[in-house]
Image: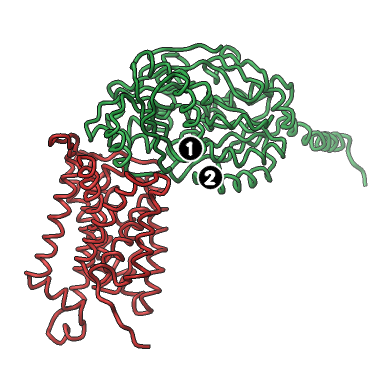
Amino acid sequence: MSLFVQVLISGLAIGAIYALIATGFSLLSQGSQTVNFAQGDFVVVPAFVILAANSYGLPIWASFIVALVVAALVLGILFKRLMVDPILPHGAMQLSIATMALSIVLQNGMLNADGAQAFPFPGINGGMHFGTIFIDWQSVSILLAAVAAVVALNLFMGRTRIGRAIQASAQGPQVARLLGINVARMVTITFVLNAALVTLAALLVSPIYLVKFDNGIGIGLAAFSAAIIGGFNQVRGAVVGGLLLGVVQNFAATFGPTQYRDAVPMLLLIIFILFRPQGLLGRAEERRV
Amino acid sequence: MRISTSKLAIGCSLLAVLATAPAAFAAKSVLEIAIPAELSGSGATVGVLWRDGVMMGIEDVNAKGGIRGHKLHGTAYDTQTNPAVSRAVIQKALDGKPFAVLGPVYSGSVIVDEALTQKAGITEIMGGEAGNLTAQGDPTLFRTSLGQAQTIPPLISYLKDTVHAKSVGASYVNDDFGKAGNVLFMADAKKAGLNVTTDISSEAGQVTFQPDLLKMQAAKTDAIFLYDHEEEVARFLKGFRQMGMKAAIVGGSTVADAQAIKLSQGAADGAISFAGIASSSPLPAIQNFVKRFEAKYKTHPDHNAIKGYMAVAMLQAGVDKEGKASAKGLAAALHGLTITPDKYPLIMTPMKVLANGDIDNGGYLIQVKGGKAVVLKYVGPK
């Protein structure tokens, strides 16, 4: 029983990180039809910024704020202005391919700037015994931070004027414009929100993954799968998909044949694509040709 | 037309210089050294240090006039920690007719490319440690460190005699290096009467080891045998400490490697390994190398950097035994050679090259203490 609980908690912790990144996927997709295949690399960039700021003597919380500002500017505003705005009018497919190219550029940029080696990242050590169950603080802090971020995001989107304006812009940009909403600004805010989510994910995942230029490949794939499993057009779906994927991955690795640990989440993804392509909480979308 | 005697003399001299120049340059031709290494991908942690070690060796040899008058020139190739890419880059390197190939480090890459160097008759001095590499019967393949058949038995003895372990959990990386080590460990553990409670494979580049650790925790093992690469070792050990586990950790040279220690941020403390060479060795030559390497590359060298550096010394000694710089005869010259630091300072510790391409230079039982690898015991060459 204790093994089951521990596997569940550590699965939820890693799934919470997937959920954060998948939420960003979903936000960008809804807000601007952008499927960002560089999303995994977007997590690695702030991790390097945090390390760089930390190496100049800033405490980790201050380094995180520096990374938030840098990510908001570079991965939020600049990404939108220099890449999304010029390419999106040519089609969402073209933009998706451009983000794949961006992923390669970011990876090689980080490789040249920081080298191919991994870097250590400060984390939280220790934990607590509950009978035979040991809960480590790192997992607990990941879960709490991720849940807090998702709740805050939901409150922001549902309870604030800007949040509702973002939703209106995503659901019907033309109607939103008629209602006096500055749709372009709302889309920019969506990109900044995504930048904040990936920066938080960087802070949470890096103590476990270490910081390395190509970490984004695995992270991005997992988060993309989570978004599809949960439902690409629903933020809540991305959260559920992320948690489910993390838990399934952990249970498969613990109780299944270890050689196939990476295959099980992919199998789950295939099953969803075949039998429930809209995902767990997503809406089926019709398209007229 | 009349030509003065002095002009004729100058002209003849010039012609003589031009005529003899190719011979003079040929006598001092540059020996091209191909350095395939894991410069990106999950093995970059070790490959970059190997390349830098080789490059530093080449610089040191060139500073002393080269090998028998021949300067060395190294060209690094990135295998991307991918055996298929490794094979392709070695083919590319061989097309350039190198004098020798120094690398790669990952056994999985060596196993697929050694046939190419063997076919070309070019000596390959590599960093792989998998036991089966030198069992292929390739006369052109040489190690720079002990193989698994030499490093695993001392760890079994340590588990039995010092830890007094009754049960052991094994964790190994699912590649040629890890699988070969695991096979040897399982056989030796059985012979020693150790109960292997869990035998878990992981993937290269694996980022979380919590499921593996939870299985081991549930099995209540006295010790863990960890056979993985540096980054994964660090992730495993961080998870191990975070979960408050207490089992003794023993493993391959990577467990007490400088990179693994740095990345694990204190989690490697207490881990034990047995390695043929170690940057924590108290030998003055090795400590001097460590200082120079740190000053030059601004990073601490691990055993892979030392292995790369020593590979250049093996070249030096091989060419000297040959009596000339002939790529085709180098491998034959290396077999059975004993290389000593008094004649070849780059070798740093006496090394015997065995008939199958293995080497014997003794070994160190190492423990990580306070974030540093500390030598517990030195076992001399047989």
Q: Is residue B264 visible?
A: no
Asked which secondary structure carries label 2, the reply is loop
* Residue A233 pos. (x, y %): 25, 72
Q: Residue at x 62, y 20 (%)?
A: B353
Q: How is the image coloured?
A: by chain
Q: Amino acid at mark 1?
A: Gly
Q: Is A97 displayed left or right of A43 in the figure? A: right
Q: Chain of mark 1?
A: B
Image vertical order of residue B346 relative to residue A78, above or below: above
Q: Which residue is mark 1?
A: B47
* Residue B322 pos. (x, y %): 73, 22
Crowding at mark 1 (Cα within 10 Å: few <14, some 14-19, many 20+) = many
Q: Which residue is mark 2?
A: B79
Q: Are marks 2 and 1 in contact (CB under 8 Å)?
A: yes
Viewer-side residue, A58 vs A90: A90
Q: Quadrant of the C terminus of chain B?
A: top right
**Which of the chains is green?**
B
Q: Amino acid at mark 2?
A: Thr
**Which of the chains is red?**
A
Image vertical order of residue A229 relative to residue B310, above or below: below
